[in-house]
């Protein structure tokens, strides 16, 4: 099997590494398909999934060399490049485990769009992020025109996509596109520690929280609150919630 995507599972954390370092992990038809397949497979084998890039970069977007070849074959030939990548990005929201993007180096165009699809983003202090489609006379094809406005608002998203301006790690955090900026010296260890801390939590609770937040965003507030009401009663009726309550009351009683 091709090593275009590498995977590893350790202590409940699955790591998916986009592995085209010489192409700065550019997205190809094969990479999109492998990323999608690995996400589905690893969600059953781990409690947290981390997506990274090899060679010091996250991902610079679509592979223009491959796209040029596909374009010469016509519209239908180009479709798999986008359908495969979209399937991978769309799958993240449906998985019962948190998906974390650990972003370093360049995260451009499709790489930025993959970030937007993640549940949580941790970003290297020296990372550079941008939707660069407009710099090359292109338009977003990996969800950026739809996810980014929902994440940061219409004006900020539109201005960014139209200009293609680069964003620093601080700006990415300030815009709400990353949870935390990590120092270069501790990036790898901090990503690992964060993922393992998530993996140590109750899997059912994490899955339900992710479902509530994701589903609730598409509902009116009242319907979202109703959804939460039903979910919390269902969850409290389960064994793991009972064990958590017993553990808390035991700890409190021993102090």
Image (cartoon, rainbow, N blue to C red):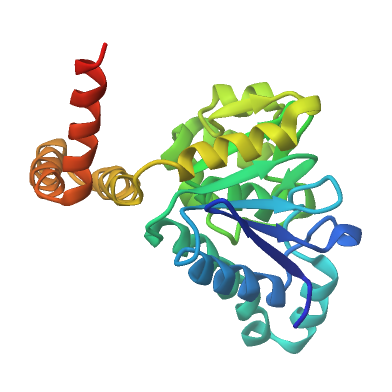
Q: Is residue 113 left or right of residue 183?
A: left
* Quadrant of res 228: top left
For residue 6, say whether it is visible. yes
Residue at horizontal 75 percent and vertical 39 percent from the top = 104
- The residue nearer to you, when weighing 112 against 103, is 103
One can see residue 158 in this view: no
Q: Depth check: 71 or 83 in front?
A: 83
Farthest residue to the top: give it.
255
Residue lying farthest front?
A: 254
Q: Taking 17 as reference, is 69 above or below it? A: below
Placement of the C terminus among the 4 image quadrants: top left
Is 160 drawn above or below residue 1 in the view shown?
A: above
The quarter of the picture where the N terminus appears is: bottom right
Viewer-nearest residue: 218 or 227 = 227
Residue 67 on image: x %, y %: 77, 73
- Is 130 situated left or right of 185 in this image? left
Going by the picture, which residue comes out furthest to the right?
Answer: 22
**Against 217, is 110 above or below?**
below
Q: Residue at x 82, y 81 (%)?
A: 69
Residue 48 vertical position relative to residue 120 in the rendered view, above or below:
below
Nearer-the-camera pick, 226 or 252: 252
Which residue: 86% across, 51% down?
Answer: 55
Residue 135: x, y in percent?
77, 47
Total numbered badges shown on the rendered structure: 0
Please provide percent x and percent y for residue 75.
64, 83
Residue at (47% x, 40% y) in the render = 198
């Amino acid at each position: 099997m091709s090593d275009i995507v590498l995977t590893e599972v350790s202590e409940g954390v699955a790591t998916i590494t986009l592995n085209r370092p010489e192409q700065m992990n550019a997205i190809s038809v094969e990479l999109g398909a492998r990323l999608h397949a690995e996400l589905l497979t690893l969600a059953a084998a781990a409690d947290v999934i981390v997506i990274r890039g090899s060679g010091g970069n996250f991902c610079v977007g679509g592979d223009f060399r491959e796209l040029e070849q596909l374009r010469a074959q016509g519209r239908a030939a180009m479709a798999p490049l986008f359908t495969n990548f979209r399937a991978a990005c769309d799958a993240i929201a449906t998985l019962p485990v948190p998906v974390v993007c650990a972003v370093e180096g360049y995260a451009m165009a499709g790489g930025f769009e993959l970030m937007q699809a993640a549940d949580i983003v941790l970003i290297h202090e020296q990372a550079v992020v941008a939707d660069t489609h407009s710099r090359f006379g292109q338009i977003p094809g990996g969800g950026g025109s739809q996810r980014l406005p929902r994440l940061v608002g219409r004006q900020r998203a539109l201005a960014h996509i139209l200009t293609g301006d680069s964003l620093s790690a601080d700006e990415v955090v300030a815009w709400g596109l990353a949870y935390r900026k990590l120092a270069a010296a501790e990036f790898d260890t901090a990503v690992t520690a964060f993922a393992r801390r998530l993996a140590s939590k109750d899997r059912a609770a994490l899955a339900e929280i992710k479902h509530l937040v994701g589903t609730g965003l598409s509902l009116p507030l009242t319907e979202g609150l109703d959804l939460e009401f039903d979910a919390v009663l269902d969850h409290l009726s389960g064994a793991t919630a009972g064990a958590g309550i017993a553990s808390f009351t035991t700890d409190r009683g021993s102090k």
